[in-house]
Image (cartoon, helix red, strand yellow):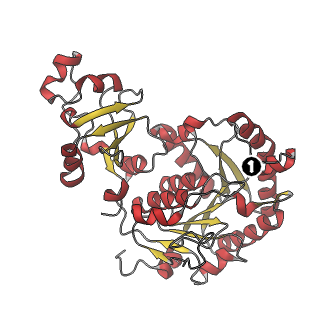
Amino acid sequence: MSQERLDRKSILERCRRLIIKVGSAVLTGPRGLNLVMIHRLSDQIAELREKGLEIVIVTSGAVASGIRKVGLAERPRTIPQKQAAAAVGQGALMEAWEGAFYKYDLHVAQILLTTEDLAHRHRYLNARNTLETLLDWGILPVINENDTVVIEEIKFGDNDQLAATIAGLIGADLVINLTDTEGLYDCDPRVDATARLIPVVHGIDSKLLACAGSAPGSVGTGGMVTKIIAARKCLASGIPMIIASGRERDVILRLFHGENLGTLFLPRKRIYHGKKLWLANLPKPAGDIVLDKGAVKALREHGKSLLPIGIAKVRGNFGIGAPVRCLNETEEIVGIGLSNYRSSEIEQIKGHHSEEIERIIGYKHSDEVIHRNNFVLTGDAGDME
């Protein structure tokens, strides 16, 4: 689809596979889960299902529901406390969604995921196959991060990133991210009364991220910045995303009826496919490689592979085939790739020419530490070019 035809109307008219992410601030209230809100959302989703749309729900609310159920005064700060709250609240969350769709004779399926589930290529493909089967069966997948077993090292950080990853996983046509604000503003509306809603975003850079602010809500883990980062992942997959207020009455149906609500993030084109799409949406790589200026230029401007001569530092403990981030000298991300060497070996060969690899570590897998076929550009320079 050309850029001229890629607009709000055409996106919604062509949408056949939809991800709806609902945040904790939308789903929870002072007494726990907001059952009225869940039923309102299910009414809208059921109507879209009647029109032939395939829909996946990414839901927050397990931890927040558990907090209210247990009677905690504030959000848990430690991982064990969060896990316990999620264990209490997850059942109630799924029961609420199941009950809301029961009147429409729609079945739901609970799927709990962690970063680790999607960081491994075969698990990523297994998750995709499961979701495709559920959609073929006419069942509504309801996905949440597995807070009951998650630890900080394997945590998505928030369901915004999870929704973006799932969108790329199943090739969604659109992501609707429902939160407690109307969309992205040009400055923080909580502190500046002149803040204006940005209706359309064509590309994401550091300046746009600065507009977002970073303070999360009282019951959620993500602020607007996490939603912008999620939007960037969607755009790299060629998938548009809308951030809108989940508290707005009938917001989903009104969007599909053509109302200009929220902020629409428009992709220029689908950049990555297959393995490269998996890399682009990878939630948490295994380590970092810091590059010199020459290596950054070779990757960004010339589409070259990463050679050891261009590596300044290596961080983390990872093995052959592990996904790693490539950073420039100021720690900005350049891209993500699969390493041909262990981190301990890269530490030894960094700064050396490829012909020296075998002499230094005793063997040579290849001249490249990361081959260009196993590398994707990310960050400001690589998102939408």
Any part of residue 171 in sight? no
The residue depicted at 33 percent of the width and 36 percent of the height is 289
| Position above or below: 107 against 130 | below
Q: Residue 98: image x %, image y %? A: 78, 56
Q: Which residue is mark 1?
A: 62
Between 274 and 67, the one nearer to me in the picture: 67
Where is residue 163 shown, x and y percent of the image?
56, 56
Image x and y of residue 144, in percent: 66, 49
Q: Seen from this angle, which residue lies furthest left?
A: 355
Instruction: Specify whether residue 111 is in view.
Output: yes
Indicate the amino acid at tag 1. Ala
Q: Secondary structure at mark 1?
A: helix
| Quadrant holding the N terminus | bottom left
Seen in the picture, residue 14 relative to 336 is either above or below; the reply is: below
Quarter occupied by residue 127: top right
Q: Report the quarter where the C terminus lies.
A: bottom left
Q: Is residue 192 above or below residue 105?
A: below
* Left or right for 200, reference 325: right
Residue at point 41%, 65% (across, down): 207
In the rendered structure, the answer to whether residue 107 lies left or right of residue 114 reads right
What residue lies at 22% left-to-right and 34% top-to-bottom?
A: 368
- Quarter of the image where one finds residue 195: bottom right
Q: Decide if residue 187 is on the left or right side of residue 110.
A: left
Q: Nearer the viewer, residue 42 or 30?
A: 30
Q: Residues within 10 Å of mark 1 (few under 14, many from 20)?
A: many
Total of numbered circles in the picture?
A: 1
Q: Position of residue 201 (x, y in %)?
A: 44, 72
Query: Which residue: 74% across, 49% down?
Result: 62
Name the outermost residue toward the top.
Answer: 362
